[in-house]
């Protein structure tokens, strides 16, 4: 911009950035789950995952893509099974670092010849706020970012196409219920009884199931049928049939669907996914109890798609704990 005075250009260069994310690593390929690892200006690493709609799942060919977005560097909530929480919380993402995950992924995909702007529609049609971090612990920045991604002058992504996942921050769930936008809410339940949940999710001590469900009930009353339970199946921890009755009761009370997810192994952690027979049995028992449930036959298992895993691997490699890191 040589039409601007040199001093102004200098100031712009020193004080502003057009792009906050630098691509460090990309895994996966066209038409499959793609994982992006970004470096931020302070050299922190975060991830986004692009998931194409599965024609076999939806019964139609589709251009829909869902982007899984991160909201923090690391996570303070320390769920025992999760790679994101392993090294603690480093910082909240800024508004632009959240928004730019969508833009940078679309830019990256344009390079491969999938020009999203060609038809005037964007590549990313749905968002799931399920990447690294606890979204509701970075509430203000998340809300600003989602307002921008939702606005007609911004991303134009409908609020009903945006799902926020939380490990259960009850007060923020109530606050979200009072917002104008109708986001979908996913609760990472992973246990239908306090004693089960407490073993794997420290947050349950702060907001036990009674408090969490009361907050969800408030959300459900304000927003309608917008809640989904995420339930990772971990062998020997929460995959027993004694969970079915309390889980079905919770789901019925909140009119919630249950999404069963076989646990994704994290290197260095002892947890395992149950056998497929156990997974199917759990699903059938839930359905028999009258609950709408799905069992995710995982996409992206082979590319470390579960939250925080690619970052963890890359940081270990940087630290000389794994194979040499190649850019
Ligand atoms: N902090 C938020 C959102 C990020 S985690 C939350 O906890 O909901 C997104 C989802 O991935 C959560 O349901 C979380 O429990 C799940 N998850 C974390 N580690 C996983 C793993 N190794 N395998 C499968 N799911 C995992
Ligand atoms: Fe944090 Fe969610 Fe991982 Fe728990 S599951 S440690 S809340 S990112």
Image: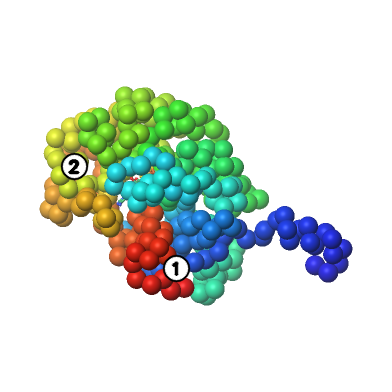
Q: Which mark is residue 249?
A: none
Tell me which image quadrant ligand 2 sits in: top left
Q: Which mark is residue 26?
A: 1
Q: Classify 10 Å Cα crowding around label 1: few (below 14), some (14-19), many (20 and above).
A: some
Q: Is residue 314 visible?
A: no
x then y, percent, for residue 146: 55, 45
Q: Is residue 325 visible?
A: yes
Seen at 38% across and 57% down, the residue is 312
Seen at 40% across and 27% down, the residue is 215
Q: Residue 237 carries which label?
A: 2
x then y, percent, for residue 208: 32, 27
Seen at 41% across and 33% down, the residue is 169
- Mark 1 in CB contact with mark 2 (< 8 angstroms): no
Colouring style: rainbow
Q: Nearer the viewer, residue 249 or 24?
A: 24
x then y, percent, for residue 133: 44, 46
Question: Regarding mark 2 in the picture, which secondary structure is present there?
Answer: loop
Is the CB atom of the residue marked by disc 2 within 8 angstroms of ligand 1's nearest atom?
Answer: no
Quadrant of the image occupied by residue 282: top left
Q: Nearer the viewer, residue 72 or 315?
A: 315
Q: Classify 10 Å Cα crowding around label 2: few (below 14), some (14-19), many (20 and above).
A: some
Of mark 1 and mark 2, the one earlier in the sequence is 1
Is the CB atom of the residue marked by disc 1 within 8 angstroms of ligand 1's nearest atom?
Answer: no
Seen at 18% across and 36% down, the residue is 244
Q: Distance between the residues labelled 1 and 2?
A: 33 Å
Q: Residue furthest front?
A: 320
Question: Regarding mark 1 in the picture, which secondary structure is present there?
Answer: strand
Numbered circles on residues, count: 2
């Amino acid at each position: 911009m040589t039409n601007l005075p040199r001093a102004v250009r200098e100031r712009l260069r020193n004080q502003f950035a057009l792009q906050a994310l630098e691509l460090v690593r990309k895994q996966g390929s066209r038409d499959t789950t793609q994982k992006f690892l970004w470096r931020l200006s302070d050299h922190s690493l975060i991830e986004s995952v692009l998931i194409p709609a599965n024609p076999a799942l939806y019964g139609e060919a589709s251009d829909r893509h869902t982007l899984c977005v991160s909201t923090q560097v690391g996570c303070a909530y320390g769920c025992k099974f999760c790679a994101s929480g392993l090294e603690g919380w480093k910082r909240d993402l800024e508004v632009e670092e959240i928004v730019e995950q969508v833009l940078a992924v679309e830019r990256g995909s344009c390079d491969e010849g999938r020009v999203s702007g060609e038809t005037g529609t964007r590549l990313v049609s749905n968002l799931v706020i399920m990447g690294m971090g606890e979204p509701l612990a970075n509430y203000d920045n998340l809300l600003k970012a989602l307002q921008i991604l939702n606005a007609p002058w911004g991303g134009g992504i409908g609020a009903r196409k945006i799902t926020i996942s939380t490990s259960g921050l009850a007060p923020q769930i109530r606050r979200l219920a009072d917002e104008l936008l109708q986001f979908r809410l996913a609760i990472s339940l992973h246990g239908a009884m306090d004693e089960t949940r407490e073993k794997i999710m420290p947050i349950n001590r702060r907001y036990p199931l009674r408090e969490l469900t009361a907050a969800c009930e408030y959300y459900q009353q304000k927003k309608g049928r917008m809640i989904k339970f995420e339930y990772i199946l971990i062998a020997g921890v929460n995959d027993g049939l004694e969970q079915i009755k309390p889980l079905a009761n919770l789901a019925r009370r909140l009119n919630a669907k249950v999404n069963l997810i076989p646990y994704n192994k994290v290197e260095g952690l002892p947890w395992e996914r149950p056998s497929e027979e156990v997974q199917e049995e759990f699903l059938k028992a839930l359905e028999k109890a009258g609950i709408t449930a799905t069992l995710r036959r995982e996409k992206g298992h082979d590319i470390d798609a579960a939250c925080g895993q690619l970052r963890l691997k890359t940081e270990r490699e940087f630290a000389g704990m794994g194979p040499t890191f190649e850019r």
